[in-house]
Every structure is written in structure tokens, then in C-alpha cells.
Image: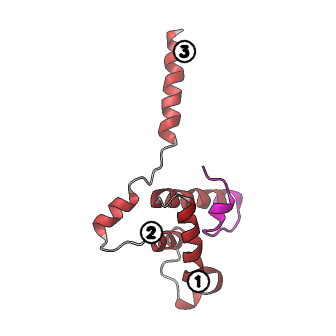
Amino acid sequence: MKDKEQEEKKEEKDLENNLKNPFAGYLDNLKKHKQAVNPVHEIVNCYYKMNGWEKMPKDFYTGRYAYNKLASEAKKLYIACSEELDDCIWALDKMKYLAEKGGFDWSIITCLKHKLK
């Protein structure tokens, strides 16, 4: 009986550990290395980096990939995540995974349309 209870507690503890945000402390770490950090700009920059678009030609950043459009989406995501940059980056990471797994195209705003809790 005790073994079963211990096993259940261990499984619960493992589940709790798996659900912790891997990006916790991201903003604090970023502030150590950069002078002025704007969370909205950081979300857009992470989105570009996740997709390998940080060094594209200037004409690439128009229309759907325009910085001002993505910044607007990033601000909405930032507000929806209770202004926690760590949670925003985690949402981007989850959406990237889901998009790769499901074979669909995504943007920052897509994170708000999916329940990523």
C-alpha cells in the first residue's frame, strides 16, 4: 500500500516538474546582458529567431512579416499573458512545436487563438 502511495506522489511530482515554464527568468537574464529591453520587441525578435528570419533581406519584412504588424500582435500577447515575458516566449515555443507537428503556418497572434495553458 505504501509503495503505491509513494509511486503516485512521485508521478505527481514528475508532472509538476514537467509543467514548469522552461523560460522562467528569461527577462531578468536578458536585462543582465542588454541595456534597455522592451518586452514587445523581444517577443518579435524571438519570433524571427525561432523561424530563422533574423538575417533576411529588407524586402522580406513587409506585409505579413512587417515589424510593426508583429509588434502589435506581440503587444496583445504580452497583455494576454499578464505582462509576463517568460510566459509569452513559452507560448511562442509551444506554438512553434504545434505548427511543426500539425504542418500549419503560424504567427504571434495565433498564440492567442489557441489555448496554450
Q: Is residue 75 magenta?
A: no
Where residue 60 appears, as percent x and y from the top left, is 58, 86
Where residue 21 appears, as percent x and y from the top left, is 48, 49
What colour scheme was applied to this rendering of the protein? secondary structure
Q: Is residue 21 above or below residue 68?
A: above
Main structural element of the magenta stretch: helix, strand or loop?
loop
Rounded to the nearest whole Å, what is the CA distance between mark 2 and mark 3? 46 Å
Would you say the residues marked 2 and 1 are in contact, meaning their CB atoms lie under 8 Å apart?
no
Quadrant of the frame with the N terminus: top right
Foreground tag (2 vs 1): 2
Q: Which residue is mark 1?
A: 66
Q: Is residue 36 above or below residue 110?
A: below
Q: Which residue is mark 3?
A: 4
Q: Amino acid at mark 1?
A: Ala
**Residue at x 44%, y 54% (from the top left corner):** 23
- Magenta span covers which residues? 100-117
Where residue 43 appears, as percent x and y from the top left, is 49, 69
Q: Which residue is mark 2?
A: 39
Q: Amino acid at mark 2?
A: Pro
Give SS at disc 2. helix
Disc with the residue nearer the chain's start (2 vs 1): 2
Q: Residues within 10 Å of mark 2 (few under 14, many from 20)?
A: many
**Residue at x 65%, y 80% (from the top left corner):** 64
Q: Is residue 116 left or right of residue 3?
A: right
Where residue 79 appears, as percent x and y from the top left, is 54, 64
Foreground of the two, 7 or 103: 7
Q: Residues within 10 Å of mark 1 (few under 14, many from 20)?
A: few
Residue lying furthest bottom: 59
Disc with the residue nearer the chain's start (1 vs 3): 3
